[in-house]
Image (spheres, helix red, strand yellow):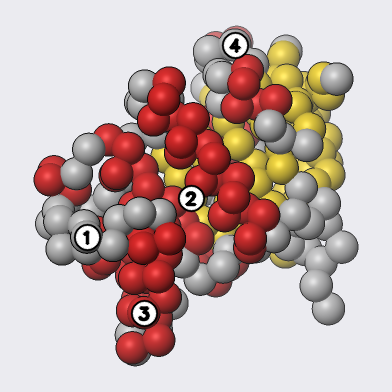
Amino acid sequence: MPAENSLEVHHLFKSVGQGEHALSILTGVELVVKPAETIALIGESGSGKSTLLAILAGLDDGSSGEVRLLGEPLHNMDEEARARLRAKHVGFVFQSFMLIPTLNALENVELPALLRGENDKASREQAKRLLEQLGLGKRLDHLPAQLSGGEQQRVALARAFNGRPSVLFADEPTGNLDRHTGDRIADLLFSLNRDYATTLILVTHDPELAARCDRRLRLRDGKLWEEA
């Protein structure tokens, strides 16, 4: 049975350091995200948005509290189990694209399927279709260094949606792009999100990008506050 919620977070705390030198980053975060919902995490630089995103994705641990991703208790899972969950159900888009420089565009998009143990003609054709959908049908054999920033981010989007992830985490996906290119990437991101009915958790400093999400949650003083 599918999980009722894509994400559930209860009493999440995160601190670094020990004793009198400990620094509190998250202080009792509560969050529930429904399937196919789009969430913008906003806040000042250094407020802990990227730290929270990493914990929600199972890439980091909280100091205490519960985090359930698609019903699975990340707080009670080892890294191997988390990696299997991410490979099967989760996509990522980063500000710095995070493409493998020695792989061409098609190979970068195929990578999630290979990590899931899928290495067949159907998965390769799916990767090609995604790149063609994003206007990169003539860039399949190009290495990342041969692509513009906007083209690299489109490859990253295609990679993230390859395998139809249930949840997509995006950390400043337009942060390294000019306004025109960033708006184009945002259009593609939300279009793919609708097509695949993917839950989107998005960290951004861009108020226009945040306004396109269903909900905007500001991280302030270690807690999340919903904005109108």
Q: CA distance from mark 4 to mark 3?
A: 42 Å
Q: Nearer the viewer, mark 1 or mark 4?
A: 1
- Confirm or deny contact between disc 1 and disc 4 (CB under 8 A): no
Residue on which the image places disc 4: 44
Mark nearer the viewer, 1 or 2: 1
Q: Earlier in the sequence, mark 2 or mark 4?
A: 4
Q: Is residue 6 above or below residue 188?
A: below
Q: Is residue 47 above or below residue 173?
A: above
Question: How many neighbours does mark 4 have within 10 angstroms: few (below 14), some (14-19), or many (20 or more)?
Answer: few
Cβ atoms under marks 4 and 3 closer than 8 Å: no
Dividing the picture into quarters, in which one does residue 132 lie?
A: bottom left
Q: Position of residue 180 (x, y in %)?
A: 41, 25
In the figure, 106 relative to 152: above or below? Answer: below
CA distance for labels 2 and 4: 22 Å
Q: Earlier in the sequence, mark 4 or mark 3?
A: 4
Quadrant in the picture for the C terminus: top right
Q: Residue at x 83, y 57 (%)?
A: 5
- Mark nearer the N terminus (1 vs 2): 2
Q: Which residue is more in the foreground, 191 or 76? A: 191
Disc number lying in front (3 or 2) = 3
Q: Quadrant of residue 52?
A: top right
Q: Identify the residue at image location x=54%, y=45%.
A: 189
| Numbered disc 3: secondary structure | helix
Residue 122 circle label: none
> Label 2 belongs to which residue?
92
Residue 138 bears which disc, if any? Answer: 1
Circle 3 residue:
125
Q: Quadrant of residue 16?
A: top right
Specify the amino acid type for callout 4. Glu
